[in-house]
Amino acid sequence: MKKRIAIFASGSGSNAQKLMEHFKRSADTEISLVLTNNPDAYVLQRADNFEIPSHIFDKNEFYKTDEVIDLLKNLDIDFIVLAGFLWLIPKNLIDAYPGRIVNIHPAILPKFGGKGMYGDNVHNAVMAAGETEGGITIHYVDEHYDEGEYIYQAKYKIDKNDNLEMVKFKGQQLEHLHYPRIIESLVKKIKK
């Protein structure tokens, strides 16, 4: 029986796309569902292109009910991957999937983490601080932004001539290279 992953995303979904591509070839794992809080998120189109079902939810459904958890359980979801998902994960979802929710952050945590630190906000903060290195952190999700246990970190060099687009590109290259591989290694350890 295949292990089943759900992806939560709020935007374009480039990491979600890399995960879909990676697991499309897998004999034992599949991306079974894409969930979003944004009805205009491009990740919905990406899911459709791979014929992966999607679900759009609102704040009330996510924070005040168990509907999202019920959906995940009904679909036999084993593991949850956040890929550019901007809302804090509620305690009931963390409790339903202990040690089975993972996020990727576009900086070397603990620096440049926390509420509001995502996407270009992170890259701009890294550049404004005059950092010579940027990076990514893959981590477990807890009830606070970017504070879960680290699983993997990778760095890239920031050259003094690098602009926002260059820094973002270098970070995304690392994300796309490492996130699918790390997710695969974590999912392999799950007993079905």
Image (cartoon, rainbow, N blue to C red):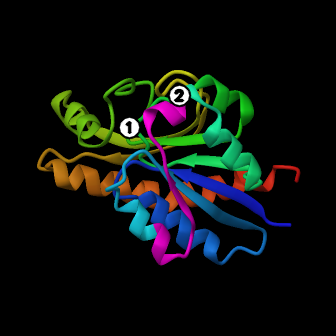
Q: Is residue 29 left or right of residue 132?
A: right
First in sequence, mark 2 or 1: give its number.
Answer: 2
Q: Is residue 34 left or right of residue 136?
A: right
User: What amino acid does circle 1 point to?
Assistant: Ala
Is residue 59 positioned above or below 6 on the image?
Answer: above
Q: Is residue 133 left or right of residue 110?
A: left
Residue 98 showing in the rendered view: no
Residue nearest the viewer, comparing 55 with 120 = 55
Q: Position of residue 3 (x, y in %)?
A: 77, 60
User: What amino acid does circle 2 point to?
Assistant: Tyr
Is residue 137 positioned above or below 162 on the image?
Answer: above
Is residue 50 positioned above or below 54 on the image?
Answer: below
Q: Which region shows up in magenta?
A: 47-63
Q: Is residue 128 left or right of residue 151?
A: left
Quick check: is 52 in the magenta stretch? yes
- Label 2, secondary structure: give it: helix
Quick check: is 61 in the magenta stretch? yes
Crowdedness of circle 2 by 10 Å Cα count: few (<14), some, many (20+)? some
Q: Residue beneath label 1, please? A: 107
Q: Position of residue 156 (x, y in %)?
A: 36, 48
Residue 116 showing in the rendered view: yes
Q: Residue beneath label 2, please? A: 63
